[in-house]
Amino acid sequence: MEDLLRYPIGKFTPQPAYTAEEIQASLSRIESLPARLDNVVKLMSAAQLDTPYRDGGWTIRQVVHHVADSHMNAFIR
């Protein structure tokens, strides 16, 4: 049960190779994520933002900040 909560969509298993279309689709999803997150979280109350997504897990606010930090570091690299 712990793994189901920790990895709700499963652990990442990379493919041996990716097509140009798959790479472009992934880049598009990464590019659109900040706006999509913004559209969702701006509708949430402070209490909702401070709710952990699982016992012992980060709050939604922490996850959003982590995503922003991750994106900034990726752009810098």
Image (cartoon, grey):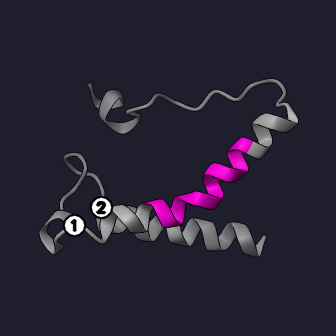
Residue at horizontal 44 percent and vertical 31 percent from the top? 9
Residue 22 placed where, x, y %? Answer: 76, 35
Q: Which residue is mark 2?
A: 60
Whether pointer 1 and pointer 2 mark residues with C-beta atoms closer than 8 Å, the reply is yes
Principal SS element in the magenta part? helix
Q: Which one is in front, 36 or 3?
A: 36
- Is residue 72 left or right of 55 when viewed as pictured? right
Residue at horizontal 36 percent and vertical 38 percent from the top? 6
Residue at horizontal 29 percent and vertical 31 percent from the top? 2
Q: Which residue is mark 1?
A: 44
Mark 1 or 2, which is nearer the eye? Answer: 1
Residue 53 placed where, x, y %? Answer: 25, 50
Earlier along the polypeptide chain: callout 1 or callout 2? 1
Q: Amino acid at mark 2?
A: Ile
Question: In terms of secondary structure, where does tag 2 sit?
Answer: helix
Residue at horizontal 26 percent and vertical 24 percent from the top? 1
